[in-house]
Image (cartoon, rainbow, N blue to C red):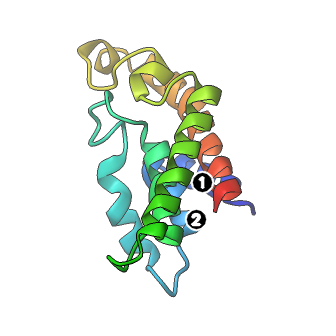
């Protein structure tokens, strides 16, 4: 199963967008799956379900890029520059494909708004269509960049 397929599977099993994208990129010898799931939880729904921040799927992909390429030695600023460059590329590609990079831009509604909460059918449809696409897109782009 590809990283993209794994991410969609996790999302469809009720993990949030950030968790779904991040976990397939975590080598189990480096980070246990349960810890990776915990680590990525707060980034879902445009950061803590606020809906106005960067989409959690994109944030999960950024976590995956950082895990692989991030700076661990303060003297090695090349790793930081490389990670930032890959992250910017991810955000540019993701935004171009999804029509934005915030949940509100992608879904056309703020997920923390009363209108969203009052219409569970619409919310379910958006999650099944737009959020699944965001998860698949973020995972695919991350896989290309890692």
The residue at the point 37 percent across, 15 percent down is 119
Which numbered tag is attached to residue 7?
Answer: 1
Does residue 13 appear anywhere in the picture? no
31 to the left or right of 48: right
Please tell me which residue lies in front, 19 or 99: 99
Mark 2 Cα-neighbour bin, 10 Å: few <14, some 14–19, many ≥20: many
The answer to whether the residue labelled 1 contacts the one labelled 2, judged by CB atoms less than 8 Å apart, is yes
Please tell me which residue lies in front, 87 or 33: 87
Please tell me which residue lies in front, 17 or 88: 88
121 to the left or right of 146: left
Q: Would you identify the image quadrant in which residue 55 lies?
A: top left
* Mark with earlier residue (1, 2): 1
Q: Which residue is mark 2?
A: 24
Q: Give percent across and percent down for residue 88.
A: 51, 44
Which numbered tag is attached to residue 18?
Answer: none
Q: Give percent across and percent down for residue 99.
A: 57, 21
Mark 1 Cα-neighbour bin, 10 Å: few <14, some 14–19, many ≥20: many
Does residue 55 appear anywhere in the picture? yes
């Amino acid at each position: 199963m590809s990283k993209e397929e794994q991410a969609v599977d996790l999302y469809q099993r009720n993990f949030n967008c950030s968790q779904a994208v991040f976990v397939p990129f975590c080598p189990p010898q480096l980070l246990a799956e349960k810890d990776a799931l915990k680590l990525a939880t707060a980034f879902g729904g445009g950061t803590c379900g606020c809906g106005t921040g960067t989409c959690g799927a994109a944030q999960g992909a950024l976590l995956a890029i950082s895990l692989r390429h991030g700076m661990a030695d303060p003297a090695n600023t090349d790793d930081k520059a490389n990670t930032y460059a890959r992250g910017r590329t991810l955000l540019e590609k993701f935004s171009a494909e999804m029509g934005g990079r915030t949940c509100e831009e992608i879904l056309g509604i703020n997920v923390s708004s009363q209108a969203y909460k009052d219409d569970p059918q619409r919310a379910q449809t958006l999650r099944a269509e737009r959020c699944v696409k965001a998860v698949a897109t973020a995972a695919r782009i991350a896989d290309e960049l890692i």
